[in-house]
Image: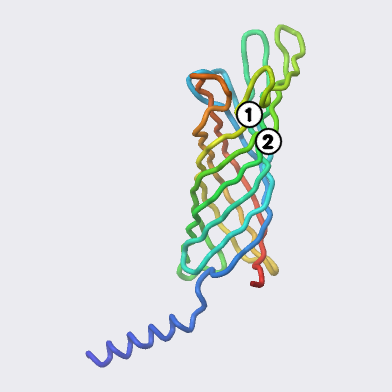
Amino acid sequence: MKKFAIVLSLAGASAFAATPAFGQGIDLGLKGGVNFAKLSGDDIEDVSNRSGFAVGAFLNVSTGGFFSIQPEVLFSQKGAKLQSEDGEATMKLSYVEIPVLLKVSPMLVGATGFKPFLYAGPVLGISAGCSISGEDEGISVDVDCGVGDFIDTKSTDLSAVFGAGGSFAVGRGTFSVEARYGLGLSDVFDVEDMDVKNRAISVLVGYSIRLGL
């Protein structure tokens, strides 16, 4: 019995050594989709979701195993729809976002190419514009609200993102579908003691190829 256990251990070690590291390599891809954005906080109310888009590129770096690091660069539209007794308006916020995600991609036993994943990480957003348009007491309103404007927004926005999805091989690359939630950590406006933060649910699709390094 002891000899059998030794043989079995050696066979398992040989099989592991002969198997390429799962997910090892660098993948470069593009992704895009829709944001369902909103503003929340103690100093804002009567708001609803504003739909926008997110599009950009990502690099997934894995050294084998289930874990990888995925930096991204996205152009992302956020903001909210604002309601009042006298009218309604849409605040349109735009950011260049740089998420750095820790991604976990477990291997499913018996799976045929489908690979689920979970991820989380910090996001640095760089303001790329802000405007408010709508009606107030029957009068059309269209004003800028970016950095240095009358309504002053901060030049950067810090947030955390949490997401999940799945991927599978398509042609020479990998197709992915994912959903993520962005939780704003810093205030949108550059006004002391004003608590207004970004929130967003995003649905994204992507396509990546393995780089030949």
Please tell me how many numbered marks the rendered image carries.
2
Q: Is residue 205 left or right of residue 118?
A: right
| Mark sitting on residue 52 | 2
**Crowd around label 1: few <14 · some 14–19 · many ≥20 (10 Å):** many
From this viewpoint, which residue is outermost toward the left? 2
Work out whether 193 lies above or below 25: above
Question: How far apart are the two marked residues, 2 and 1, measured between alpha carbons?
Answer: 9 Å
Q: Position of residue 35 (x, y in %)?
A: 63, 38
Label 1 belongs to which residue? 79
Work out whether 109 lies above or below 143: below
- Comparing 96 with 108, the one in front is 96
Q: State yes or no: discs 2 and 1 in contact (Cβ < 8 Å).
A: yes
Q: Position of residue 53 (x, y in %)?
A: 69, 39
Q: What kind of residue is marked 1? A: Gly
Q: What kind of residue is marked 2? A: Gly
Work out whether 180 lies above or below 19: above
**Crowd around label 2: few <14 · some 14–19 · many ≥20 (10 Å):** many
- Comparing 110 with 124, the one in front is 124
